[in-house]
Amino acid sequence: MSRIALPTTQPTTLARDVEALGPAETETATFGMGCFWGPDALFGAKPGVVRTRVGYAGGTTSEPTYYALGDHTEVVQIEYDPDRWTYAELLDVVWANHDWTRSQKRQYRGVILAHDERQRAVAERSRDALADRTGQSVETAVESLQQFSPAEDYHQKYELRTLPVVADELEELYGDAFTASTVAARLNGFAAGYGSEGQQRDLLATLDLPPTVLDEVRRRL
Ligand code: MHO
């Protein structure tokens, strides 16, 4: 399954961003956990998560969009450092952050979309262990990922867009690479209230952004 594609021409800020925050090898995971804005921010704030994006998957219709979703589901796709996260640990975050006891309408259903047989086996084990531990039936599905369609730009890093001064500046700096930026993923998470104060302070100290933008982030965190 393909990685989250980085544009071939990378602005210098992105190169620095990847160097500072990205490992050489990453793995990819895809989860449906309700409206995709929330998990984009939840995972984006976590150290060891290198990139996030939201999109539509889990269905069969071609070229889904927000208003023509077909049988797809809103999902978050994350690229993570396998030295810092196991897939099973990511699944623990998934279970803890959506209601897996209830079946939802298809747009918002809980679904773990495995990228390969190994992920699928780990997900099935994790699901079965959860059911055993709690005595409840797990409504969240485990399936194999067939296709992923990125959502419209205005859904990407949605929480960060509530800080337009910051989102606009980053979009200008990063261009097409905005969604794939680790910095945008982190700030999106921070904007939603995720991440410790120390983590927020440390990241902000490394960013080569205009003082007006940094002030705006600090004011709003
Ligand atoms: N319609 C809901 C969820 C949006 S999510 C991208 C809202 O406006 O909050 O489906």
Image (cartoon, rainbow, N blue to C red):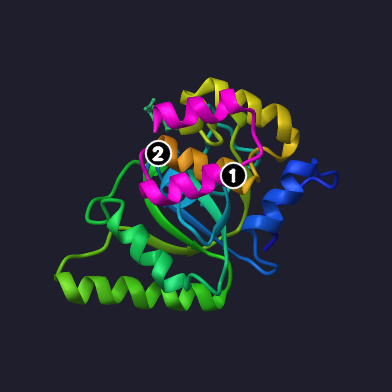
Q: Is residue 83 magenta?
A: no
- Name the spot of residue 118 as percent of width and height, x first: 53, 78
According to the picture, the residue beneath numbered tag 1 turns out to be 183
Find residue 16 and report its horizontal and vertical position in percent.
72, 50
Give whichever of 106, 164 is nearer the camera.
164
Say whether marks 1 and 2 touch (CB < 8 Å). no
- Report the quarter where the N terminus lies: bottom right
**Marker disc for residue 41:** none
In magenta segment, residue 210? yes
Residue 41, located in which quarter of the rendered image? top left
* Residue on which the image places disc 2: 35
Q: In this view, does 186 lie to the left or right of 92?
A: right
Asked if one can make out residue 61 in the rendered structure from this viewpoint, the answer is no
Which residue occupies the foreground of this view, 123 or 78? 78
- Which is more toward the observer, 104 or 165? 165
Q: State whether label 2 is within 8 Å of ligand 1.
A: yes
User: In the structure shown, which secondary structural element does the residue marked by tag 1 occupy?
Assistant: helix
Q: Main secondary structure of the magenta part?
A: helix
Q: Give the range drawn in magenta.
A: 193-221
Q: Give the quadrant of residue 27.
A: bottom right
Ligand 1 has an atom within 8 Å of the beta carbon of the residue at disc 1: no
Q: In this view, does 105 lie above or below 112?
A: above
User: In this rendering, does residue 112 appear at all?
Assistant: yes
Determine crowd level at label 2: few under 14, some 14-19, many 20+ residues with C-alpha closer than 10 A: some
Q: Earlier in the sequence, mark 1 or mark 2?
A: 2
